[in-house]
Amino acid sequence: MNFIFVGPPGAGKGTIAARVAQELSVPHISTGEIFRENIRGRTELGVKIKELLDRGELVPDHLTIELVKERLTHPDVQSGWILDGFPRTRAQAEALDEFVHIDLIFHLEVDDETVVGRLGGRRVHPASGRTYHVVHNPPKQEGIDDVSGEPLVKRDDDERDAIKHRLEVYRQQTAPVVEYYAAKDRLTQVDASRQMETVLAEVLDLIATRK
Ligand code: AP5
């Protein structure tokens, strides 16, 4: 089965998608993570998009759509996939509908105040993308990744001004994606302001019901 997670920055898309992917043994495809890998590896794409990500701007549609199209040809997607952070514009949503079938589209809803609190306290392990929160999901040892023992960092786009700008970009460019799916009655709404384990349990229940 194929699932999508949409919602504002900090809604918990990455956290929930990673856990669901683990439960179902399907790949978790995060466009944000793919872009950050390219930036770390200083690839041609990475160099081109670094400044956009740091400012909280979207990567142009043609680059993002091609990247996802290509990723969905890899052999590991045959028994299903989870897309996190894509589509993020109406053009991306329309393009996706042209080349794949989607079983469930989860819309994770949270208010702005929660977003600011979650992103301000987020810490990540850059090499794996593992994500923590200083209060809600702390690592065993402060500032250290549980698995590798390497240091955790704050993402460049988790600074206050970038968070504010990402919320504006979300309202202008990604809210129309939510409207696009809602108009076709394809959205599954999830109140993502609740505790992580509660949100995860609800998502897994909805998937089990759908199977
Ligand atoms: P991306 O990495 O996708 O960033 P985002 O959508 O802004 O989402 P986040 O990763 O910030 O938040 P999340 O919802 O995954 O929350 P998380 O689970 O980490 O994209 C980054 C950038 O790449 C974009 O700005 C853009 O430039 C570019 N990009 C990506 N996709 C693109 C596209 N399709 N088109 C164009 N450009 C694109 O959780 C946040 C924190 O909260 C964590 O600390 C977590 O531990 C904690 N938390 C999670 N759930 C809960 C809970 N229920 N209770 C308490 N704490 C929680």
Image (cartoon, rainbow, N blue to C red):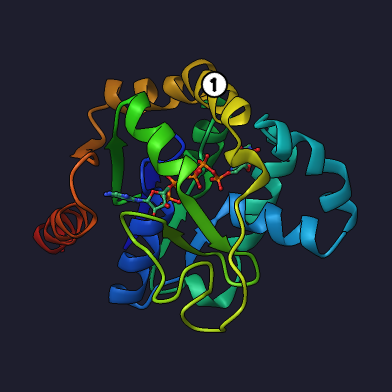
Return the x and y of residue 128 as percentages of the image width and height. Answer: 58, 72
Residue 89 position (above or below residue 53): above
Residue 160 position (above or below residue 67): above
Camera-side residue: 5 or 170? Answer: 170
Which residue sits at x=47%, y=42%? 119
Camera-side residue: 130 or 88? Answer: 130
Which residue sits at x=39%, y=67%? 80
Q: Which residue is mark 1?
A: 173
Q: Residues within 10 Å of mark 1 (few under 14, many from 20)?
A: some
Camera-side residue: 20 or 69? Answer: 20
Return the x and y of residue 170 as percentages of the image width and height. Answer: 50, 25
Q: Residue furthest bottom?
A: 148
Which amino acid is tagged 1? Gln
Residue 23 position (above or below residue 106): below
Locate the N terminus by quadrant.
bottom left
Which residue sits at x=36%, y=41%? 11
* One can see residue 101 in this view: no
Return the x and y of residue 83 as percentages of the image width and height. Answer: 46, 53
Q: Quadrant of residue 183?
A: top left
